[in-house]
Image (cartoon, coloured by chain):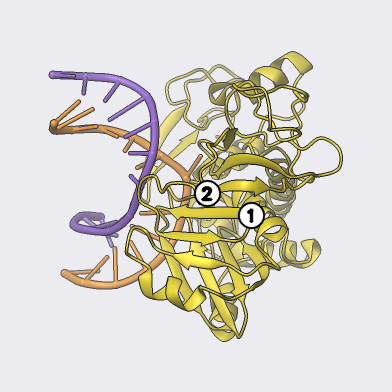
Chain colours: A yellow, B orange, C purple
Amino acid sequence: MPEGHSVHRIARQFDRNIVGHAVGASSPQGRFVEGAAIISGRTATQVRAVGKQMFLEFDDDLWLRVHLGMYGAWDFAGEILVDPTIASANGRMGQTNQRGTELGEAILDSAGENSLTSIGAPRRSRVHVRMSEQTTGLSDEGDEWPPPVVGQVRLRLLTDLTCADLRGPTACELQSADEVAATIAKLGPDPLVDDVREGEERFVSVVRRKPTSIGLLLMDQSVVSGIGNVYRAELLFRARQNPHTPGRDVPEEVVRGIWRDWVRLLAIGVETGQMMTMDDLDPDAYRRAMASRDDRHWVYHRAGLPCRVCGTAIVVEEAATRKLYWCPSCQA
DNA sequence: TATGTATGGTAAC
DNA sequence: TTACCCTACATAT
């Protein structure tokens, strides 16, 4: 599942390909039939991403709220305009996909994941894009239009040129503008939505009041938006902060540092589509990290492996049903 | 074919 | 704290 960065990337794709277009909506899977009927025929007017949630507005005060949960994904197909800000940062420009044609400037990196790339001015090309953390990528589609439904598609949005399929969301519902505002009001600051300085003050003041451990607070979407299990572990390691320390006992400068680091990691994530948490690597290690998920993190998913800094075995423990990875030595 | 796992969240107990 | 939801994929049998 996507953490915050993916949702912002997805919102950009909606902005480019869906907003401003009339859409037909359907629920091939059958679990959002009524909602799809209400959407169908309306024009999408704007999209917003806050934390892990996306809000798509249609005519007449109608909003679609989508939360992808752990395994949700959006698939884009058709004549897709790839957002130039969603550019590959891995220097693999110019590669082609299996067929090597038609994709034009939208290409797949050699790792077979992420790195949706746009070269030069955006132009339309016939592609298929999956927007989720696990398997963002491109593949050639057949000529069928609309594309055949594959698997459990909760919601299909179709414009003249673009097809967006939603599968496996935790939440997919219609809201009024007031309800959207209420939903967003419950969320902590998102560096890409809120003023960064204000966000920092909100984050710091909340964390520094809580007896809850900093490890749990970082996962609490009312404290800060968009951080998930990967970024949580990595932010704590980068701060050399013990996850069990109560928020109010974490030095203020450390709390501020974590927020500022989140601002940075989120920006990198949105640019690259990957949860790259080991920056400042030499070029070789950087290439390795971008190519393989196993080489991308300091502690996440590394239980029992030696800490990259001190060699101590990385520990994993269960924290509120989620796995928490950390180095007991570096984060003592 | 069955089982386990996952980047999340909610509601009930 | 536990149960449960949602889906795809990897691994084991």
The answer to whether residue A211 of the structure is visible from this angle is no
**The C terminus of chain A lies in which quarter of the figure?**
top right
Q: Residue at x 60, y 34 (%)?
A: A138
Q: Residue at x 51, y 79 (%)?
A: A175
Q: Residue furthest right?
A: A120
- Which structural element holds mark 1? loop
Nearer to me, A287 or A241: A287
Which disc is residue A145 wearing? 2
Q: Amino acid at mark 1?
A: Leu
The answer to whether residue A50 of the structure is visible from this angle is yes
Nearer to me, A305 or A163: A163
Task: Residue A191: name its quadrant.
Answer: bottom right
Marks 2 and 1 sit apart, C-alpha to C-alpha, by: 9 Å
Classify residue A37 as left or right of residue A233.
left
Classify residue A329 as left or right of residue A276.
left
Q: Which residue is mark 1?
A: A161
